[in-house]
Amino acid sequence: MSTVVSEDRIREMVESVGGLEAVLEGERQFKADQRYLEDNRERFKEQYPDQWIGIVHLRVVAHGDTADDVLAALLEADEDISGAVLHHACVEDSIWLLAEGSRCAA
């Protein structure tokens, strides 16, 4: 069951994160970072084989063996992780097993 949120509450929520323009800019940046990932996927497989990478503002800011490692490095670098794109650069074609600590399985 979904909850109905009033228009006033939505306005409050949007204002609490900097206003509508800030929300829209965050969405634009996230989409640009996703495109950057798609455009460079093969290069990332070569440069960061079987590692997690964190992309913020069209650059790889952190990489590591686990998503948690990358998130910690992003926070340590004082990056806003709310819009970060995380990606696992699997070298082999793979399927995902959805369980804690999942990794690529060929």
Image: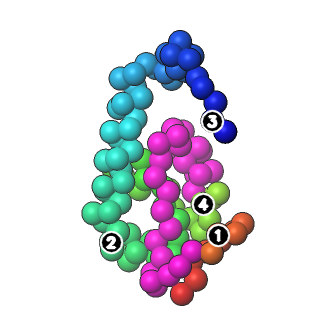
Q: Which residue is mark 3?
A: 2
Give me the residue at 38% from left, 77% from top.
46
Q: Given contact means CB atoms under 8 Å apart, are the residues at marks 1 and 4 in contact? A: no
Q: Say if residue 58 shows up in the picture.
A: yes
Q: Earlier in the sequence, mark 2 or mark 4?
A: 2
Q: Which residues are magenta?
A: 70-96
Labelled disc at residue 67: 4
Q: Quadrant of residue 39?
A: bottom left
Q: Which residue is mark 2?
A: 43
Crowd around label 4: few <14 · some 14–19 · many ≥20 (10 Å): some
Q: Given contact means CB atoms under 8 Å apart, are the residues at marks 2 and 4 in contact? A: no
User: Dot 1: what SS?
Assistant: loop
Percent x, y of residue 55: 43, 53
**Residue lying furthest right:** 100
Q: Amino acid at mark 4?
A: Ala
Viewer-closest of 30 and 78: 30
Q: Quadrant of residue 26?
A: top left
